[in-house]
Amino acid sequence: MKKFLAMLLVFSLLLACAACGGDGSSSQQSTSSADSSTAGTSSEDAPVESNADVEDGDYPVLRFNMNTATGDPRSKTSEVMDAINEILREKAHAEIEPVWVTFADMQTQLNLLLTGGDDSLDFFSSFWYQPLGILVSNGQVAELDSLLEEYGQETKELFGDYEAVLDCGRVGGKLYGIPSYTAWTAPNIYFSQKADADSANIDWSKVTDLDSATEAMLAMKKANPDHYYIPGSTEPYWIPKGIDYLGDQNYLGVLLDPEKSTTIENYYESDYFLNIMENVKIWQQNGIISPDPMSCNSATLASMQNGLVSGTTGYSWDAAEFCHQANVSGVYGGDLVGAEISPSYITTGNVTTYLWHITPFCKEPEAAMRVLNLLYTDPEVATIFSYGVEGVTYQLDENGAAAYLDGENGQTSGWTGGQSFVVPNGTIVPLWFDQSPDANERIYESNKNAKRSIALGFTCDMEPVADQVAACANVIAQYYTPLMNGVVDIDEVVPVFQKALHDAGIDEIIKCKQEQLDDWLAAQG
Protein backbone atom coordinates (compact mmCIF):
# COMPACT_ATOMS: atom_id res chain seq x y z
CA MET A 1 0.00 0.00 0.00
CA LYS A 2 1.28 3.40 -0.91
CA LYS A 3 3.07 5.40 1.72
CA PHE A 4 0.53 8.09 1.57
CA LEU A 5 -2.44 5.78 1.45
CA ALA A 6 -1.18 3.94 4.46
CA MET A 7 -0.92 7.16 6.33
CA LEU A 8 -3.98 8.68 5.61
CA LEU A 9 -6.61 9.02 7.82
CA VAL A 10 -7.50 10.10 5.46
CA PHE A 11 -6.68 9.55 7.68
CA SER A 12 -6.29 12.92 5.03
CA LEU A 13 -8.43 10.00 3.96
CA LEU A 14 -7.46 11.42 1.47
CA LEU A 15 -6.19 13.26 2.73
CA ALA A 16 -5.10 13.78 0.27
CA CYS A 17 -5.83 11.17 -0.59
CA ALA A 18 -4.40 11.88 -3.41
CA ALA A 19 -5.28 12.34 -1.41
CA CYS A 20 -3.08 12.84 -0.16
CA GLY A 21 -2.61 12.27 -0.09
CA GLY A 22 -2.10 10.68 -0.87
CA ASP A 23 -2.48 11.55 1.35
CA GLY A 24 -2.12 12.88 3.59
CA SER A 25 -0.51 12.48 1.59
CA SER A 26 0.39 12.70 -5.46
CA SER A 27 2.61 15.07 -7.11
CA GLN A 28 5.48 13.38 -8.73
CA GLN A 29 7.12 14.03 -12.02
CA SER A 30 9.55 12.06 -14.11
CA THR A 31 13.05 13.25 -13.51
CA SER A 32 13.59 13.46 -17.23
CA SER A 33 10.61 15.76 -17.66
CA ALA A 34 10.95 17.92 -14.57
CA ASP A 35 10.54 21.55 -15.55
CA SER A 36 12.91 23.64 -13.51
CA SER A 37 10.80 26.69 -14.15
CA THR A 38 7.86 25.21 -12.28
CA ALA A 39 9.07 22.24 -10.28
CA GLY A 40 12.39 23.41 -8.93
CA THR A 41 15.98 23.12 -10.04
CA SER A 42 18.67 20.67 -9.18
CA SER A 43 21.16 21.77 -6.54
CA GLU A 44 23.87 19.52 -7.96
CA ASP A 45 26.11 22.45 -8.82
CA ALA A 46 25.09 24.70 -5.96
CA PRO A 47 28.03 25.66 -3.75
CA VAL A 48 27.98 24.33 -0.21
CA GLU A 49 29.27 26.45 2.59
CA SER A 50 32.15 24.88 4.42
CA ASN A 51 31.22 23.22 7.66
CA ALA A 52 33.63 23.81 10.49
CA ASP A 53 32.44 20.62 12.19
CA VAL A 54 33.31 18.42 9.21
CA GLU A 55 36.83 17.21 9.81
CA ASP A 56 38.45 14.08 8.45
CA GLY A 57 35.16 12.76 7.12
CA ASP A 58 33.23 13.42 10.33
CA TYR A 59 29.78 14.64 9.25
CA PRO A 60 26.89 15.73 11.45
CA VAL A 61 24.12 13.13 11.50
CA LEU A 62 20.69 14.75 11.38
CA ARG A 63 17.71 12.83 12.75
CA PHE A 64 14.27 13.11 11.14
CA ASN A 65 10.93 11.33 11.50
CA MET A 66 9.64 8.68 9.11
CA ASN A 67 5.99 7.86 9.83
CA THR A 68 4.63 4.37 9.18
CA ALA A 69 1.65 2.26 10.17
CA THR A 70 3.81 0.00 12.33
CA GLY A 71 6.72 2.23 13.28
CA ASP A 72 9.12 -0.63 12.58
CA PRO A 73 12.36 0.21 10.76
CA ARG A 74 12.16 -0.96 7.16
CA SER A 75 14.42 -3.81 6.20
CA LYS A 76 16.33 -1.87 3.51
CA THR A 77 16.87 1.25 5.62
CA SER A 78 20.64 0.82 5.75
CA GLU A 79 20.94 0.47 1.97
CA VAL A 80 18.77 3.53 1.39
CA MET A 81 20.67 5.61 3.93
CA ASP A 82 24.00 4.55 2.48
CA ALA A 83 22.88 5.72 -0.96
CA ILE A 84 21.43 9.05 0.10
CA ASN A 85 24.18 9.86 2.58
CA GLU A 86 26.86 9.30 -0.05
CA ILE A 87 25.29 12.21 -1.96
CA LEU A 88 24.53 14.32 1.09
CA ARG A 89 28.09 14.14 2.34
CA GLU A 90 29.22 15.71 -0.91
CA LYS A 91 26.43 18.20 -1.47
CA ALA A 92 25.29 19.06 2.07
CA HIS A 93 28.26 18.06 4.23
CA ALA A 94 25.84 16.08 6.39
CA GLU A 95 24.18 12.71 6.85
CA ILE A 96 20.62 11.85 7.86
CA GLU A 97 19.13 9.11 10.03
CA PRO A 98 15.42 8.21 10.17
CA VAL A 99 13.50 7.78 13.40
CA TRP A 100 10.50 5.55 12.75
CA VAL A 101 7.25 6.86 14.21
CA THR A 102 3.98 4.94 14.43
CA PHE A 103 0.90 6.83 13.24
CA ALA A 104 -1.19 5.57 16.12
CA ASP A 105 1.38 6.80 18.68
CA MET A 106 2.51 9.87 16.77
CA GLN A 107 1.48 12.39 19.42
CA THR A 108 3.32 10.60 22.22
CA GLN A 109 6.41 9.78 20.19
CA LEU A 110 6.85 13.23 18.65
CA ASN A 111 6.20 14.89 22.00
CA LEU A 112 9.22 12.99 23.31
CA LEU A 113 11.32 13.55 20.18
CA LEU A 114 10.77 17.32 20.30
CA THR A 115 11.82 18.06 23.87
CA GLY A 116 15.46 18.97 23.36
CA GLY A 117 17.05 15.85 24.79
CA ASP A 118 19.85 13.83 23.23
CA ASP A 119 17.31 11.88 21.16
CA SER A 120 15.53 14.92 19.74
CA LEU A 121 14.89 15.31 16.04
CA ASP A 122 16.86 17.80 13.98
CA PHE A 123 14.28 18.32 11.24
CA PHE A 124 10.81 16.86 10.83
CA SER A 125 7.46 16.74 9.07
CA SER A 126 4.57 17.88 11.22
CA PHE A 127 2.01 16.02 9.12
CA TRP A 128 -1.06 15.61 11.34
CA TYR A 129 0.96 16.13 14.50
CA GLN A 130 0.24 19.68 15.67
CA PRO A 131 -0.90 22.92 14.00
CA LEU A 132 1.88 25.35 13.20
CA GLY A 133 0.69 27.90 15.74
CA ILE A 134 0.91 25.30 18.50
CA LEU A 135 4.37 24.16 17.38
CA VAL A 136 5.56 27.74 17.62
CA SER A 137 3.85 28.27 20.97
CA ASN A 138 5.47 25.08 22.30
CA GLY A 139 8.94 26.12 21.13
CA GLN A 140 9.28 23.01 18.97
CA VAL A 141 10.26 24.73 15.71
CA ALA A 142 13.06 27.13 14.79
CA GLU A 143 12.79 30.32 12.73
CA LEU A 144 13.95 29.64 9.19
CA ASP A 145 14.19 32.99 7.39
CA SER A 146 17.94 33.51 7.60
CA LEU A 147 18.65 29.81 7.02
CA LEU A 148 16.45 29.74 3.92
CA GLU A 149 18.03 32.91 2.60
CA GLU A 150 21.59 31.64 2.99
CA TYR A 151 21.32 27.87 2.48
CA GLY A 152 17.98 27.38 0.74
CA GLN A 153 17.90 29.84 -2.13
CA GLU A 154 16.83 27.18 -4.65
CA THR A 155 13.93 26.21 -2.39
CA LYS A 156 12.94 29.84 -1.99
CA GLU A 157 12.97 30.26 -5.77
CA LEU A 158 10.77 27.17 -6.08
CA PHE A 159 7.98 29.15 -4.41
CA GLY A 160 8.69 32.28 -6.45
CA ASP A 161 5.22 32.32 -8.04
CA TYR A 162 3.56 31.18 -4.83
CA GLU A 163 4.84 33.52 -2.16
CA ALA A 164 1.52 33.33 -0.32
CA VAL A 165 1.88 29.55 -0.11
CA LEU A 166 5.34 29.81 1.43
CA ASP A 167 3.95 32.44 3.81
CA CYS A 168 1.57 29.83 5.19
CA GLY A 169 4.61 28.65 7.16
CA ARG A 170 4.84 32.01 8.93
CA VAL A 171 3.63 33.00 12.38
CA GLY A 172 4.02 36.61 13.44
CA GLY A 173 5.83 37.34 10.20
CA LYS A 174 8.54 34.74 10.85
CA LEU A 175 8.96 31.54 8.83
CA TYR A 176 8.78 28.33 10.88
CA GLY A 177 7.80 25.74 8.28
CA ILE A 178 8.29 25.09 4.57
CA PRO A 179 5.28 23.60 2.75
CA SER A 180 5.65 20.49 0.67
CA TYR A 181 5.68 21.38 -3.02
CA THR A 182 2.59 19.50 -4.13
CA ALA A 183 -1.09 20.01 -4.86
CA TRP A 184 -2.44 22.66 -2.49
CA THR A 185 -6.10 22.17 -3.28
CA ALA A 186 -8.09 19.42 -1.60
CA PRO A 187 -11.87 19.30 -2.02
CA ASN A 188 -13.81 16.77 0.00
CA ILE A 189 -14.73 13.69 -1.99
CA TYR A 190 -17.01 10.73 -1.52
CA PHE A 191 -16.10 7.43 -3.12
CA SER A 192 -17.35 3.86 -3.00
CA GLN A 193 -16.85 0.48 -4.53
CA LYS A 194 -17.99 0.62 -8.15
CA ALA A 195 -19.95 -2.59 -7.73
CA ASP A 196 -22.00 -1.04 -4.94
CA ALA A 197 -22.61 2.13 -6.92
CA ASP A 198 -23.63 0.17 -10.01
CA SER A 199 -26.04 -1.97 -8.01
CA ALA A 200 -27.84 1.21 -6.92
CA ASN A 201 -27.57 2.99 -10.28
CA ILE A 202 -25.72 5.95 -8.75
CA ASP A 203 -25.40 8.94 -11.07
CA TRP A 204 -22.20 10.54 -9.79
CA SER A 205 -22.84 13.74 -11.70
CA LYS A 206 -25.61 14.39 -9.16
CA VAL A 207 -23.38 13.79 -6.12
CA THR A 208 -22.16 17.33 -5.46
CA ASP A 209 -22.36 17.86 -1.70
CA LEU A 210 -22.71 15.92 1.56
CA ASP A 211 -26.50 15.75 1.35
CA SER A 212 -26.46 14.18 -2.12
CA ALA A 213 -23.66 11.84 -1.00
CA THR A 214 -25.95 10.66 1.79
CA GLU A 215 -28.68 9.99 -0.77
CA ALA A 216 -26.19 7.82 -2.66
CA MET A 217 -25.25 6.00 0.56
CA LEU A 218 -28.89 5.25 1.31
CA ALA A 219 -29.44 3.89 -2.17
CA MET A 220 -26.36 1.67 -1.94
CA LYS A 221 -27.38 0.49 1.55
CA LYS A 222 -30.80 -0.51 0.22
CA ALA A 223 -29.17 -2.52 -2.56
CA ASN A 224 -26.46 -3.94 -0.26
CA PRO A 225 -27.93 -4.26 3.27
CA ASP A 226 -24.81 -5.88 4.73
CA HIS A 227 -22.45 -3.13 3.57
CA TYR A 228 -21.41 0.09 5.33
CA TYR A 229 -20.55 3.42 3.77
CA ILE A 230 -18.98 5.49 6.56
CA PRO A 231 -15.92 4.06 8.38
CA GLY A 232 -16.67 4.61 12.04
CA SER A 233 -13.39 4.97 13.89
CA THR A 234 -11.49 6.96 16.47
CA GLU A 235 -9.59 8.33 13.47
CA PRO A 236 -11.36 11.15 11.56
CA TYR A 237 -13.25 10.45 8.37
CA TRP A 238 -14.17 14.08 7.69
CA ILE A 239 -11.70 16.94 7.34
CA PRO A 240 -13.62 20.09 6.26
CA LYS A 241 -12.06 21.24 2.99
CA GLY A 242 -14.86 23.54 1.80
CA ILE A 243 -13.90 26.07 4.48
CA ASP A 244 -10.62 27.55 5.73
CA TYR A 245 -9.83 26.18 9.16
CA LEU A 246 -6.64 28.26 9.22
CA GLY A 247 -4.42 25.28 9.90
CA ASP A 248 -6.16 24.51 13.20
CA GLN A 249 -7.06 20.83 13.24
CA ASN A 250 -9.47 21.43 16.12
CA TYR A 251 -11.33 24.05 14.02
CA LEU A 252 -11.43 26.58 16.87
CA GLY A 253 -12.48 29.51 14.72
CA VAL A 254 -12.77 29.19 10.92
CA LEU A 255 -13.66 31.07 7.76
CA LEU A 256 -16.84 29.48 6.44
CA ASP A 257 -16.75 31.41 3.14
CA PRO A 258 -13.00 31.77 2.55
CA GLU A 259 -13.28 33.41 -0.85
CA LYS A 260 -15.42 36.30 0.40
CA SER A 261 -15.67 36.54 4.17
CA THR A 262 -13.02 37.62 6.67
CA THR A 263 -15.21 36.91 9.71
CA ILE A 264 -13.93 34.10 11.90
CA GLU A 265 -16.81 32.01 13.19
CA ASN A 266 -17.52 29.20 15.62
CA TYR A 267 -17.35 26.06 13.48
CA TYR A 268 -19.28 23.99 16.01
CA GLU A 269 -22.26 26.34 15.91
CA SER A 270 -22.22 26.87 12.15
CA ASP A 271 -24.81 25.62 9.66
CA TYR A 272 -21.92 23.71 8.08
CA PHE A 273 -21.26 21.62 11.20
CA LEU A 274 -24.92 21.26 12.10
CA ASN A 275 -25.59 19.91 8.61
CA ILE A 276 -22.90 17.29 9.16
CA MET A 277 -24.68 16.32 12.37
CA GLU A 278 -28.00 15.99 10.52
CA ASN A 279 -26.33 13.65 8.04
CA VAL A 280 -24.73 11.64 10.83
CA LYS A 281 -28.20 11.15 12.31
CA ILE A 282 -29.39 9.74 8.99
CA TRP A 283 -26.36 7.43 8.84
CA GLN A 284 -26.97 6.43 12.43
CA GLN A 285 -30.62 5.56 11.79
CA ASN A 286 -29.95 3.61 8.60
CA GLY A 287 -26.94 1.50 9.51
CA ILE A 288 -24.55 3.44 7.26
CA ILE A 289 -21.74 3.70 9.85
CA SER A 290 -19.63 0.58 10.40
CA PRO A 291 -20.32 -1.30 13.65
CA ASP A 292 -18.64 -0.61 17.00
CA PRO A 293 -16.87 2.53 15.75
CA MET A 294 -15.35 3.55 19.07
CA SER A 295 -13.40 0.29 19.19
CA CYS A 296 -11.83 0.85 15.77
CA ASN A 297 -8.67 2.90 15.37
CA SER A 298 -8.09 2.18 11.70
CA ALA A 299 -7.58 5.07 9.32
CA THR A 300 -10.30 5.67 6.76
CA LEU A 301 -8.42 4.19 3.85
CA ALA A 302 -7.34 1.19 5.88
CA SER A 303 -11.01 0.48 6.61
CA MET A 304 -11.68 0.57 2.89
CA GLN A 305 -8.71 -1.65 2.11
CA ASN A 306 -9.70 -4.17 4.77
CA GLY A 307 -13.28 -4.36 3.51
CA LEU A 308 -14.79 -2.94 6.70
CA VAL A 309 -16.68 -0.41 4.57
CA SER A 310 -17.60 -0.08 0.92
CA GLY A 311 -17.51 3.71 0.82
CA THR A 312 -16.16 6.72 2.66
CA THR A 313 -15.69 10.44 2.62
CA GLY A 314 -12.18 11.70 2.07
CA TYR A 315 -10.26 14.40 0.29
CA SER A 316 -7.94 14.69 -2.66
CA TRP A 317 -6.75 17.29 -5.10
CA ASP A 318 -8.84 15.48 -7.72
CA ALA A 319 -11.46 12.77 -7.23
CA ALA A 320 -10.89 11.20 -10.64
CA GLU A 321 -7.13 10.95 -10.08
CA PHE A 322 -7.64 9.44 -6.65
CA CYS A 323 -9.92 6.74 -8.05
CA HIS A 324 -7.54 6.17 -10.98
CA GLN A 325 -4.62 5.53 -8.64
CA ALA A 326 -6.69 3.30 -6.39
CA ASN A 327 -7.92 1.24 -9.34
CA VAL A 328 -4.51 0.82 -10.96
CA SER A 329 -2.89 -0.18 -7.67
CA GLY A 330 -5.77 -2.48 -6.80
CA VAL A 331 -5.38 -1.96 -3.07
CA TYR A 332 -9.12 -1.85 -2.39
CA GLY A 333 -10.09 -5.17 -3.92
CA GLY A 334 -12.27 -3.59 -6.59
CA ASP A 335 -12.62 -0.46 -8.66
CA LEU A 336 -13.63 2.78 -6.93
CA VAL A 337 -15.84 5.59 -8.22
CA GLY A 338 -16.62 8.93 -6.66
CA ALA A 339 -17.13 12.66 -6.87
CA GLU A 340 -16.03 15.92 -5.29
CA ILE A 341 -18.53 17.17 -2.72
CA SER A 342 -17.10 20.52 -1.67
CA PRO A 343 -15.54 23.60 -3.27
CA SER A 344 -11.81 23.49 -3.95
CA TYR A 345 -9.67 26.20 -2.37
CA ILE A 346 -6.03 26.79 -1.65
CA THR A 347 -6.12 27.49 2.06
CA THR A 348 -3.60 27.78 4.83
CA GLY A 349 -5.11 24.62 6.30
CA ASN A 350 -4.45 22.62 3.14
CA VAL A 351 -0.92 23.96 2.74
CA THR A 352 0.11 23.52 6.37
CA THR A 353 -1.02 19.90 6.43
CA TYR A 354 2.39 19.15 4.92
CA LEU A 355 5.15 21.26 6.50
CA TRP A 356 8.84 20.61 7.11
CA HIS A 357 10.66 22.19 10.03
CA ILE A 358 14.03 22.46 11.71
CA THR A 359 13.96 22.12 15.47
CA PRO A 360 15.47 24.65 17.87
CA PHE A 361 17.41 21.72 19.37
CA CYS A 362 19.30 21.03 16.14
CA LYS A 363 23.01 21.60 16.71
CA GLU A 364 23.65 21.96 12.96
CA PRO A 365 20.71 24.01 11.60
CA GLU A 366 22.74 25.16 8.59
CA ALA A 367 23.36 21.53 7.64
CA ALA A 368 19.68 20.73 8.17
CA MET A 369 18.68 23.50 5.78
CA ARG A 370 21.20 22.31 3.21
CA VAL A 371 19.65 18.84 3.40
CA LEU A 372 16.12 20.20 3.10
CA ASN A 373 17.18 22.35 0.17
CA LEU A 374 18.34 19.23 -1.67
CA LEU A 375 15.15 17.35 -0.80
CA TYR A 376 13.15 20.18 -2.37
CA THR A 377 15.28 20.72 -5.46
CA ASP A 378 17.59 17.79 -6.27
CA PRO A 379 15.84 14.99 -8.22
CA GLU A 380 18.41 12.33 -7.30
CA VAL A 381 18.22 13.01 -3.58
CA ALA A 382 14.43 13.39 -3.64
CA THR A 383 13.99 10.10 -5.51
CA ILE A 384 16.06 8.10 -3.02
CA PHE A 385 14.22 9.76 -0.14
CA SER A 386 10.87 8.88 -1.72
CA TYR A 387 11.44 5.44 -3.21
CA GLY A 388 14.78 4.16 -1.96
CA VAL A 389 17.34 2.57 -4.29
CA GLU A 390 16.48 1.45 -7.80
CA GLY A 391 16.79 -2.32 -8.08
CA VAL A 392 16.77 -2.68 -4.30
CA THR A 393 13.46 -1.19 -3.15
CA TYR A 394 11.81 -0.22 -6.46
CA GLN A 395 12.16 -0.48 -10.22
CA LEU A 396 11.27 1.65 -13.22
CA ASP A 397 8.70 0.21 -15.59
CA GLU A 398 8.62 0.51 -19.37
CA ASN A 399 7.09 3.98 -19.07
CA GLY A 400 9.76 5.25 -16.70
CA ALA A 401 7.39 5.16 -13.73
CA ALA A 402 8.49 3.83 -10.35
CA ALA A 403 6.97 0.58 -9.08
CA TYR A 404 7.62 -2.11 -6.53
CA LEU A 405 9.99 -4.89 -7.46
CA ASP A 406 8.30 -7.99 -8.81
CA GLY A 407 6.54 -9.81 -6.00
CA GLU A 408 6.95 -6.93 -3.54
CA ASN A 409 4.44 -4.51 -2.05
CA GLY A 410 4.30 -1.63 0.41
CA GLN A 411 4.84 -3.92 3.37
CA THR A 412 7.71 -5.94 1.89
CA SER A 413 9.59 -3.48 -0.32
CA GLY A 414 12.03 -2.57 2.44
CA TRP A 415 11.38 1.18 2.18
CA THR A 416 8.30 3.37 2.25
CA GLY A 417 7.16 2.86 -1.32
CA GLY A 418 4.68 4.87 -3.31
CA GLN A 419 4.26 8.55 -3.99
CA SER A 420 3.35 10.91 -1.20
CA PHE A 421 2.31 14.47 -0.53
CA VAL A 422 4.37 14.38 2.64
CA VAL A 423 7.83 14.35 1.02
CA PRO A 424 9.26 17.86 0.52
CA ASN A 425 8.87 17.79 -3.27
CA GLY A 426 7.31 14.86 -5.07
CA THR A 427 7.17 16.64 -8.42
CA ILE A 428 10.85 16.07 -9.23
CA VAL A 429 10.86 12.29 -8.83
CA PRO A 430 9.53 9.69 -11.28
CA LEU A 431 5.79 9.22 -11.32
CA TRP A 432 4.54 6.29 -9.27
CA PHE A 433 3.15 3.55 -11.52
CA ASP A 434 -0.50 4.19 -10.62
CA GLN A 435 -0.47 7.92 -11.40
CA SER A 436 -1.91 9.35 -14.58
CA PRO A 437 0.83 10.28 -17.06
CA ASP A 438 -0.25 13.93 -16.91
CA ALA A 439 -0.73 14.06 -13.14
CA ASN A 440 1.93 16.69 -12.52
CA GLU A 441 0.77 18.97 -15.30
CA ARG A 442 -2.76 18.82 -13.90
CA ILE A 443 -1.46 19.54 -10.40
CA TYR A 444 0.37 22.62 -11.66
CA GLU A 445 -2.80 23.77 -13.42
CA SER A 446 -4.86 23.09 -10.30
CA ASN A 447 -2.51 25.20 -8.18
CA LYS A 448 -2.41 27.96 -10.77
CA ASN A 449 -6.16 28.22 -11.32
CA ALA A 450 -7.58 27.34 -7.91
CA LYS A 451 -9.60 29.75 -5.83
CA ARG A 452 -7.59 31.16 -2.95
CA SER A 453 -8.77 31.85 0.55
CA ILE A 454 -8.62 35.50 1.53
CA ALA A 455 -6.53 34.36 4.49
CA LEU A 456 -4.02 32.32 2.46
CA GLY A 457 -0.68 32.82 4.18
CA PHE A 458 -2.13 33.72 7.58
CA THR A 459 -1.42 31.59 10.63
CA CYS A 460 -2.53 32.60 14.10
CA ASP A 461 -0.11 32.81 17.00
CA MET A 462 -1.89 30.72 19.62
CA GLU A 463 0.39 31.66 22.52
CA PRO A 464 -1.95 34.37 23.91
CA VAL A 465 -4.76 31.82 24.24
CA ALA A 466 -2.72 28.68 24.88
CA ASP A 467 -4.70 27.80 28.02
CA GLN A 468 -8.02 28.16 26.23
CA VAL A 469 -6.75 26.10 23.30
CA ALA A 470 -5.72 23.29 25.64
CA ALA A 471 -9.04 23.42 27.46
CA CYS A 472 -11.03 23.35 24.21
CA ALA A 473 -8.91 20.50 22.91
CA ASN A 474 -9.90 18.48 25.96
CA VAL A 475 -13.58 19.22 25.32
CA ILE A 476 -13.25 18.16 21.69
CA ALA A 477 -11.47 14.97 22.73
CA GLN A 478 -14.46 14.16 24.94
CA TYR A 479 -17.35 14.96 22.60
CA TYR A 480 -16.35 15.26 18.95
CA THR A 481 -15.53 11.67 17.99
CA PRO A 482 -18.63 10.14 19.67
CA LEU A 483 -20.75 12.71 17.84
CA MET A 484 -19.15 12.01 14.47
CA ASN A 485 -19.52 8.26 15.02
CA GLY A 486 -23.17 8.63 15.96
CA VAL A 487 -22.85 6.70 19.23
CA VAL A 488 -24.57 9.40 21.31
CA ASP A 489 -27.87 11.23 21.07
CA ILE A 490 -26.84 14.07 18.76
CA ASP A 491 -29.75 16.36 19.61
CA GLU A 492 -28.93 16.12 23.31
CA VAL A 493 -25.13 16.14 23.15
CA VAL A 494 -24.46 18.91 20.60
CA PRO A 495 -25.79 21.71 22.90
CA VAL A 496 -23.76 20.29 25.81
CA PHE A 497 -20.69 20.18 23.58
CA GLN A 498 -21.22 23.77 22.43
CA LYS A 499 -21.64 25.03 26.00
CA ALA A 500 -18.53 23.18 27.15
CA LEU A 501 -16.53 24.90 24.40
CA HIS A 502 -17.80 28.30 25.51
CA ASP A 503 -16.87 27.46 29.09
CA ALA A 504 -13.42 26.37 27.95
CA GLY A 505 -12.75 29.66 26.15
CA ILE A 506 -13.56 29.24 22.46
CA ASP A 507 -14.85 32.81 22.31
CA GLU A 508 -11.49 34.16 23.47
CA ILE A 509 -9.76 32.05 20.84
CA ILE A 510 -12.03 33.36 18.08
CA LYS A 511 -11.50 36.94 19.26
CA CYS A 512 -7.72 36.44 19.27
CA LYS A 513 -7.76 34.96 15.78
CA GLN A 514 -10.00 37.74 14.47
CA GLU A 515 -7.74 40.47 15.85
CA GLN A 516 -4.65 38.86 14.35
CA LEU A 517 -6.36 38.26 11.01
CA ASP A 518 -7.56 41.87 10.86
CA ASP A 519 -4.03 43.10 11.57
CA TRP A 520 -2.61 40.73 8.96
CA LEU A 521 -5.12 41.82 6.32
CA ALA A 522 -4.38 45.47 7.05
CA ALA A 523 -0.67 44.81 6.59
CA GLN A 524 -1.36 43.23 3.20
CA GLY A 525 -2.65 46.58 1.97
Image (cartoon, rainbow, N blue to C red):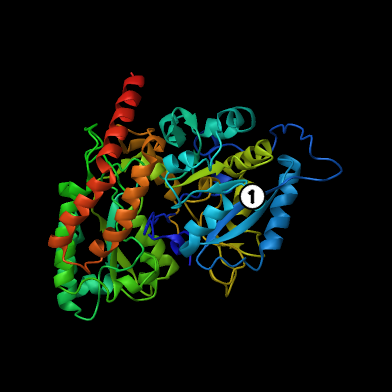
Q: Kindly give the residue lying farthest to the bottom in the view shown.
A: 226
Given residues 348 and 221, the one toward you in this image is 348
Quadrant for the C terminus, please: top left
Residue 192 horizontal/vertical position (percent) = 28, 67
For residue 410, above or below residue 17: below
For residue 85, above or below residue 452: below
91 left or right, relative to 294:
right
257 left or right, relative to 453:
left
137 left or right, relative to 288:
right
Q: Kindly give the residue lying farthest to the right in the view shown.
A: 56
225 left or right, relative to 74:
left
The secondary element bearing badge 1 is classed as loop
Q: Which residue corresponds to the image point at 74% horizontal and 41% vertical from the top-left? A: 93
Q: Which residue corresponds to the image point at 49% horizontal and 49% vertical from the top-left? A: 126
- Residue wearing tag 1: 117
Given residues 108 and 293, the one toward you in this image is 108
Q: Quadrant of residue 100?
A: bottom right
- One can see residue 243 in this view: yes
Given residues 259 and 44, the one toward you in this image is 259
Tell me if mark 1 has few (under 14), some (14-19) or many (20+) residues whose alpha carbon lies within 10 angstroms of its own: few
Q: Amino acid at mark 1?
A: Gly
Residue 76 horizontal/vertical position (percent) = 66, 65
Given residues 209 and 435, the one toward you in this image is 209
- One can see residue 202 in this view: no
Residue 413 horizontal/vertical position (percent) = 59, 68
Q: Which residue corresponds to the image point at 51% horizontal and 54% vertical from the top-left? A: 431
Q: Quadrant of residue 43?
A: top right
